[in-house]
Image (spheres, rainbow, N blue to C red):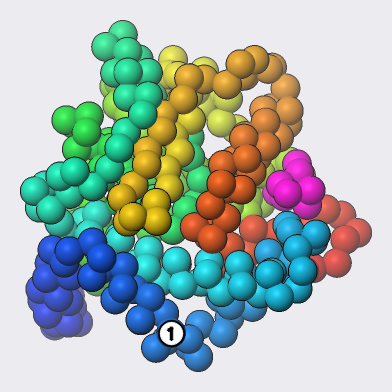
Amino acid sequence: MAARCFFLAPLDLLARVLARLPQPALLALGRGLAWLCWPLLASRRRIAGINVALCFPALHPAAQRSLARASVVNTVVGALELVRAWFAPPRVLAGLADVEGLEHLRAALARGQGVLLMCGHFTHTELAVRLLSQALGREVRVVVRRHNNACLEAWFDRARAAVYGPTIGKKDVRALLRNLMDGQPVVYSADQNFTYQNAFVPFFGVPAATLTATPDLVRRAGAVLLPFWYRRGADGRYRLRIEPTWTGWPSGDPVQDAARYMAELETVVRECPEQYLWAHRRFKTRPPGEPPVY
């Protein structure tokens, strides 16, 4: 393994240098890398273009293309924000975020409840989690997709564990329930394409295969769901917001609850659509009889 992972040492050093850059420099570097790598991002650009056209049909085609481009640029910037999340010392992150609604999270944790912090796939999600953790003064767990490359996965997991504590695999339901039952705050998103325990509910008016198991997870763990939203402002600082549980959630109807989640997420995405991860094939799974869109 060590021989195959020789590239990690210089990568680790580079990441630690990048994580310490001033915020304006980090964002400018991300934008520059996006345009430098533009030809290599053809597949992601195509997916983002399709998603934006599906979700914003009222926009002029030129505006759709502009939004898709901005989304791809933010995705590249997000890679550097991920590096900052993993490797920046606390002093580098000090004063970088405004956090609203932290009292809702503190109150639930004080009751001994685990908290499922429901969010979405924005391009700077893990940095938002790190900033929340720093404001809260304790680790906030994350649910992650494991990487197929063993070397990279070991590096990713080590970096994440250092700032979030032990990570939870995307399909490791037992670990997720265990953390919630232990009273941990766990950041969780169910807005990617799901092929199991799913239902087709509207997302920007498009049927989207969405996980329906979330209410059952919360019930089984005796936890509470709190919406967790975030965005990067024009000044480069981050606005984090924790809201009370949605009124009437859970409703007793998992499909209705999934639709509520998508509707709430859509409202937040509209606040800063260029920061959402449109490069993901959100509509890969289609309702029976409907043609593929990608």
Horizontal arrangement in the rendering, residue 16 relative to residue 184 (left or right): left
Q: Position of residue 171 (x, y in %)?
A: 47, 46
Q: Split into 4 quadrants, where in the image is the C terminus?
A: bottom right
Which residue does the image show at 56% across and 84% down from the upper left? 42
Compared with 102, 160 (above or below) is: below
Give the residue at the far top of this rendering: 111
Q: Split into 4 quadrants, where in the image is the N terminus?
A: bottom left
Q: Position of residue 275 (x, y in %)?
A: 49, 57
Determine if residue 112 is in view. Answer: no
Q: Position of residue 168 (x, y in %)?
A: 35, 43
Which residue does the image show at 36% across and 29% down from the upper left? 100
> In terms of image quadrants, where is residue 252?
top right
- The rendered magenta stretch, by its main secondary structure, is classed as strand
Q: Position of residue 137 (x, y in %)?
A: 16, 30
Residue at mark 1: 35
Compared with 178, 141 (above or below) is: below
> In terms of image quadrants, where is residue 177?
top left
Looking at the image, which is closer to me, 162 or 127?
127
Which residue does the image show at 56% across and 31% down from the upper left? 214
Q: Which residues are magenta?
A: 201-209
Which residue does the image show at 91% across and 59% down from the upper left? 289
Q: Is residue 96 magenta?
A: no
Counting labels gives 1
Horizontal arrangement in the rendering, residue 245 relative to residue 109 (left or right): right
Give the residue at the far right of this rendering: 289
Q: Is residue 204 magenta?
A: yes
Give the residue at the far front of this rendering: 235
Determine if residue 104 is in view. Answer: yes
Looking at the image, which is closer to me, 91 or 108?
91
Compared with 107, 20 (above or below) is: below
> In terms of image quadrants, where is residue 176?
top left
Give amino acid for label 1.
Trp
